[in-house]
Image (cartoon, coloured by chain):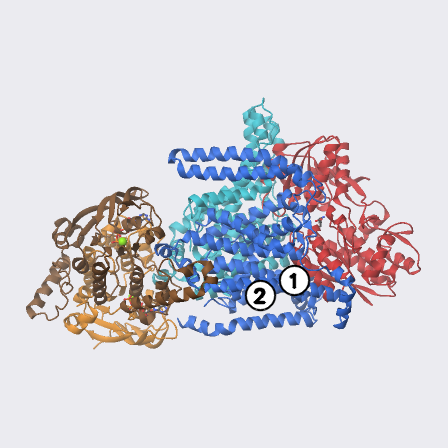
Amino acid sequence: MSQTRQADASSRWRAPLVFLVILVLFVLEGTTRNALFSGSWNTALGILNMGLISAVMALGVNMQWGYAGLFNAGVVGFIAIGGVAPVLISTKPVPGAWAAGGPGLILAFAIAIATIWAAMLAWKHLGQRWRGLAVAALLVVGFVLYRRFFDPAVTAIEANNSASAGNIGGLGLPVLLSWPVGALFAAIAAWAVGKVALGLRSDYLAIATLGIGEIISAVMRNEEWLARGVKNVSGIPRPVPYEVDLQADPSFVARAAEFGLDPTTASAIWVKLLYAGLFTVVLLLLILAAQLALNSPWGRMMRAIRDNETAAEAMGKNVTRRHLQIFVIGSAVIGLGGAMMITQDGLMSPGGYAPLRYTFLIWVMVIVGGSGNNWGAVLGAILIWFLWVKAEVWGPELMAGFTSLLPEGNLSQTLMERAPHMRFIAMGLVLLLVLRFAPRGLVPEK
Amino acid sequence: MTQAYLSASQMRGGYGKADILNDCTITVERGQIAVIVGPNGAGKSTAMKAVFGMLNLREGAVLLDGEDITRLSPQERVRKGMGFVPQTHNIFPSMTVEENLEMGAFIRDDDYRETIAQVYELFPAVADKRRQNAGELSGGQRQQVAVGRALMTRPSLLMLDEPTAGVSPIVMDELFDRIIEIARTGISILMVEQNARQALEIADIGYVLVQGTNRYTDTGKALMADPDVRRTFLGG
Amino acid sequence: EDVKIGVSFGFTGPLESMSPNMLKSVEMAAKEISDSGKFLDGSKISIVKADSTCTDAAAAVAGVERLVTSDHVKGIVGGMCSGETIASLEKVGVPNGVVMISPSATSPALSTIDSKGYFYRTSPSDARQGDVMADITLEHGIKSVAVTYTNNDYGKGLADSFVKAYEAKGGKVTINTAHDDGKADYSAEVAALAAAGGDALVVAGYVDQGGSGIVQGALDTGAFSTFVFPDGMISQVLVTKFGKSLETSFGQNPSAEGEGHDKFMEMAKADGFDGSSAFAGETYDATALIALAMQAAKSSDPKVYKDKIMDIANAPGEKIYAGELAKGLELLAEGKDIDYVGATSVELLPPGETAGVYREVDFKGGTMNVVKYR
Amino acid sequence: MDILNAGVALLNFVVIPAAAYGAQLALGALGVTLIYGILRFSNFAHGDTMAFGTAICIKVTAVLVALGISIYPLPVALLALPIAIVATAALMVGTDRLVYRFYRRKKSDPIIMVMASVGVMFVMNGLTRMFIGVDEIRFDDGARFVIDVASFRAATGLQEGLSLRTSQLITLVVTAIACWLLFRFLNRTKAGKSMRAYSDNEDLALLSGIDPERVVRLTWIIAAALATTAGVLYGLDKSFKAFNYFQILLPIFAAAIVGGLGNPVGAVAGGFIVAFSEVALTYPWKKVAGYLFPSWQPDSLLQLLSTEYKFAVSFIILIVVLLFRPTGLFRGKSF
Amino acid sequence: MIQVHDLHKHFGGFRAVDGASLTIETGSITGLIGPNGAGKSTLFNVIAGVLKPTSGKVLMDGEDISGLPPHELFHKGLLRTFQLAHEFSSMTVRENLMMVPAQQSGETLWNTWFQRGRIRAEERAIREKADEVLDFLTISHVADEKAGNLSGGQKKLLELGRTMMVDAKIVFLDEVGAGVNRTLLGTIGDAIVRLNRERGYTFCVIEHDMDFIGRLCDPVIVMAEGKVLAKGSAQNIMENEAVIEAYLGTGLKNKVAAEIEAERAQGGGHGAQPGLGKGTGNGPAGVPA
Ligand SMILES: Nc1ncnc2c1ncn2[C@@H]1O[C@H](COP(=O)(O)OP(=O)(O)OP(=O)(O)O)[C@@H](O)[C@H]1O
Ligand SMILES: Nc1ncnc2c1ncn2[C@@H]1O[C@H](COP(=O)(O)OP(=O)(O)OP(=O)(O)O)[C@@H](O)[C@H]1O
Ligand SMILES: CC(C)C[C@H](N)C(=O)O
Ligand SMILES: [Mg+2]
Ligand SMILES: [Mg+2]
């Protein structure tokens, strides 16, 4: 009882304090050059930008876990789906692709949807005895029909200029438009997933979503017609100017000179600042909306559901629907983050969607930050991302410090060779330390 | 007078900063039945936990048979002969009824089959379900298993937190009969009850606890006879 | 002057076992250059590492970003895997004007990227290897094959170009299917390949990743006894692992015959690592090219020396083999032209990648034997 | 004859490999399920525990081999296994002291424990690589085959071959023994029952005189034994590569969940279900069909799904199972 | 009116409810008693939609409600409490009550962003209501405590409090009395009667405290082994031989009866609350005024 009270008292200072720590870390990274920090604003801003994107993703996870207790371990899948949007919305159309397979694809998908719909109808309306058989038959027929149109369409699209395209291409629209679209894609996927899996309890839901995440990234890797699969899409348009253009722009060069910067550095920093601005605006809007919702009867209802589903159900709350709602919204936010990330990277490389890097790391961010608390999730995200990147340097430094104590020789040499793996150790230690000294997260839920 | 078998004196403590117990004293003689009654939230369960060492006491001491056990951990107290049935969460839900009873006999090295048979005799409804997981039992059946588990320990001090909550009248009668019997064998019994009139009926000593302090202490009969106590704590 | 060169390889991640030897190659070249005393008036080369993880583009970019903006490297050897390379090139290399020479990113996509002259690679695009492999396979009288590839841009691109060439030349592909690296078990893949059948199995994978797993499974279950190996598989490790079981198998990898290559192998041996390990030679060459171009331009500024890379790599000029970097530096200092051959017969075609000489090998008698070069 | 050929093909490519793989998963899943059941969190460090145990085993094996010890046709690693188990158990118990005990005492949310285990995973991941490097290591020095393809063909005259590796046989046998021992332990012995009691209701276990720290220690020791055994068997059968042990974590979790988390029988069943669904559902039936119906030579491979999606298949099965049995086939726990 | 027709609920081979048929009349306070394991809670859970019946039907005012999910039943006016308290443990006691009312506009996301004023007004009203209920249940001093920290009895009270937050048609109470102080239980009994009289709530009450049953309930239904054993007025039931044998027993009767006799002889000045002051077990219970 008093434990919680103590937490309440200190939590007023927790968030600003953590914020301050992060600020100091970034300033150090930007200004000081030593074994631990790089002293470059370019890297500092680079880390910050990805940190902001991670924060958006962490917000999405926090909505699902922190508000409703839904353990989504398929984060990577929704990030990937969101990432498809920039490719489909903003890249240039591939000549001939639509003509080759567009109609076939649409027809195939129409068949697929019709099949599932028919199967669901059959399941609902047929008697116990026949529905299993009928549904199976419907599904088989539907699947065969679907493949009948899908396969040739895909073959045609993939054959179309396969070295540099081989996909259906994009619409050539502004890339910012792809952010809401990415959220929408993820929301649609989440709706379908949620319809199927949300009946499951915590860890079972986790593993089901983990599987779904894997399935989604497998689809991304293998369905070339969609976004070139493992062949990657590069050169995705940007919402901000290109560095080389800025460097070629005399007025920009002059401005940079005023600040005493060379054009290369100035352009890189300027571009990153623009990104940071965009991301911050999105993040703040999301937090505002989330906070308003959380501090209202809606938030209270969600907490009740998280605490005790049976009782919430008995008190007239439609738990299934609410779960679906928050799962879809949370996933949409994650998808939005995915789209933002691809926009920033300018590259879609599905081979990289590994659960360790996305699902687990984002989870670490949420938990370290303090689940259930939006500010916690955001600060946790930026901090953990900072550490994740810096662990690459700190790990080997740690090892260097350690081996310097050892006598020269085989052992210290082998250890130095294996020093890159200190990255994991450093990251693990940092995580354990944070959890140890702030077991309920840096900024705990009230 | 000789030292009481259990003597928990001037206990002060709670779950966090605020104290739930304030100068609360409870003693039980060997072979006595002591009953704690009081309004909801008075601190009865907290007092039981304190006696059992599941709560950090800020003040006060717990003596068992003259020995100071204030610093001992609960499982050490079990080995000293204390048995406890908590108010809630008092069974192992995914173990069978029989295994629940076996767990009660965890610290016993002798043959406990006879004790099991005795428990089944006491609670025939539960005997039918011996191979079933305790989590699938009805509320009252669970309660019976919980008491049965504590009986398995063969304790010298048996602590029961509302053992009759949710059990049917016939079983309650059996239970009280049995408790009297147990006490006669020299085992001390400390229990919290809301079926207070029946409990005080068999109690050698009764405590009325209000806001963590002893409000009345007397023999069961005397408390029953006190109109004030009856009206405010025993339901008339 | 201390000239810093960045190295961005996947020291952790799915190719973590491939990177150490590549790093040793870089270090060997750097040492050779520094020790010569002739590099940019006695400058030394020092190496700064970044871990690209091979799969995580964001981490790779962050690493390379640090190399460029914090350590101020003058050139980068890397990235290692195609996807991550493209990301760091587009996000860091080109905007900041730093030369990147990748020893191992082989995706055809890199040929068409607008790198503004900042990107080169010392390995050929996979588009060509497929063609060569198809020829070799058919010459062995194999008319039908099953194909399995590692599921990334390298494996996929290679398998596709092979299938296309092979079928065009009259061969039959019974199945063309991916395997993911680092999976716990490859029974399903082996079963599928076996069921599809064929005279031989083409394994477009990595020798210390799924590729070996597949070969192992196929051998154990007797599904295939003849294998066709492209570059990702050709390595001494393969012989150590499977020895005599590969009697009828063969393969090819980018590797030039001749002096340079032999010399490199020797040097590597002296330095204590296996020179035939994947992309070791290419890595050496990538490092050497950066240094030589600097020497030719008399400047370590990437914006300046980038224009010299094609010159020194190609004829005319005196041929410079691996181990002769001192000689090359000297010639360049004298203002003479050189034609860098290095460990892998470097010959850069526009937009800056090697044409690719492949050696055909077989495994008769439990050893790896070079049959011929093409 | 053709029916025999079809059968042998299935046995050789589907049944035996899947059974061995399933047994490896089952052992891993047993460890995961035990920790989930008793300590109430999903231990993400389990894969790396397996890797660590195997690494120790490899080093010890090397020493034994250097001493000239051999138990041909069995691999020496089997002799080294007990030592590796002891070392791993010590590490696990130590980790618990340093990391998990703190949260257990605080009665933290299980998710905090999960995240702590992610931290432990990172550290162990690095440590193992520091210790033994990243290269692939083979340490199977026993006889490779019990039955090999060539001699099987020669002996039976069948067109299809059959192979059974020693490592596969050992895996199956050891798994069977380990399961039997574990079940007996949990259901018959007092210590085993006290573990189950602790997992059910920690406070009440305390009241029954069960020493929680002892239960926890026992759990880690058994989990370490299972993990090391699983890791070594897997390493003997495939080969040791630190990276792969993280990858195997996902199918292990899938197995534990399908069977019902916290339920040992479920873990074993789950292991085989995942393994068989991976292999069998992506198996092209063309060859078998060819043997059974010689007149029918289908063009297509008669493959339900291509192997790229094999992982997806096992997860789809998992989801379907969970839809009908929300806590797994054998009724697991959910905390 | 709730009608249960030949209801079965089987767990594996075990028939927890085995063909029970009963009616709960609108406006009544129906008691449901029976030995431990008779199937009372299971019957409740089936009616309340937590468990699906194996076979049989439940009608509410003639409409088939079997198998409807609990939240829909809530909106039809059917409320229930749990035998083992189901509080929202990490929310405060007040919040536990405030979350109950249906149709709160603040439960729609859109409104939380664009209808702040309306939500604030509604919240004020709900809060007042909650505080009234807390006062009534004597737990207003723990209003801001986390519900998980309440004592066993307090949780029971909270459980009951939730049903008082809305206008229900029919309320199922599963042993609200177990673990509740008897004096307070008396007050709760009064409240139930008042809700029944003044607001027309129908109640169905499971309870093992025969005083309580006797004082409130008419009719009383007795279940045993999944079936309905008897039905009638409290008085009839308590004299029913079968019920005495299966449920009430005779042990305490003798003991306590003797004591009561003794009290009567003393003149017993504490009969202020008729019914509750009477003996346990088999005393004919008076209906409160
Ligand atoms: N999930 C279950 N699986 C198997 N048996 C069950 C399950 N739930 C209840 N039972 C059995 O059904 C019977 C009826 O249980 P129920 O909880 O309805 O009893 P009850 O009448 O409410 O008893 P009490 O007065 O003790 O609360 C009991 O014998 C119990 O063991
Ligand atoms: N775990 C806890 N943390 C904080 N406060 C608690 C905790 N458990 C109980 N309390 C508080 O301590 C007080 C006494 O609780 P206790 O459980 O001892 O009451 P009780 O007398 O047993 O009541 P009941 O008859 O209802 O069981 C209550 O006000 C309760 O809110
Ligand atoms: C390291 C190499 C094997 C990488 C591979 N050639 C690629 O392009 O991804
Ligand atoms: Mg209590
Ligand atoms: Mg009940």
Q: Which residue is mark 2?
A: A430
Please rate how many residues cluster around mark 1, counting C-alpha atoms within 10 Å: few if below 14, some from 14 to 19, many from 20.
many
As drawn, the chain in red is: C
Q: Does residue A265 sit above or below E59 in this rendering?
A: below
Chain A colour in the picture: blue
Q: Does residue C357 sit above or below D132 in this rendering?
A: above
Q: Residue furthest left?
A: E265
Q: Residue at x 49, y 73 (%)?
A: A12
Q: Please identify the quarter of the rendering in which residue C145 is found.
A: top right
Q: Which SS class for mark 2?
A: helix
Front-lying residue, C122 or A154: A154
- Specify the amino acid type for callout 1: Tyr
Image coordinates of residue D159 in percent, x first then y, are 61, 27
Front-lying residue, C202 or E286: E286
Residue D94 seen: no
Label annotation for residue A78: none
Quadrant location of the C terminus of chain C in the rendered image = top right
Quadrant where ligand 4 appears: bottom left
Image coordinates of residue E242 in percent, x first then y, are 14, 48
Q: Which residue is mark 1?
A: A275
Quadrant location of the N terminus of chain C in the rendered image = bottom right
Q: Nearer the viewer, mark 1 or mark 2?
A: 1
As drawn, the chain in orange is: B
As drawn, the chain in brown is: E
Q: Chain of mark 2?
A: A
- Specify the amino acid type for callout 2: Val
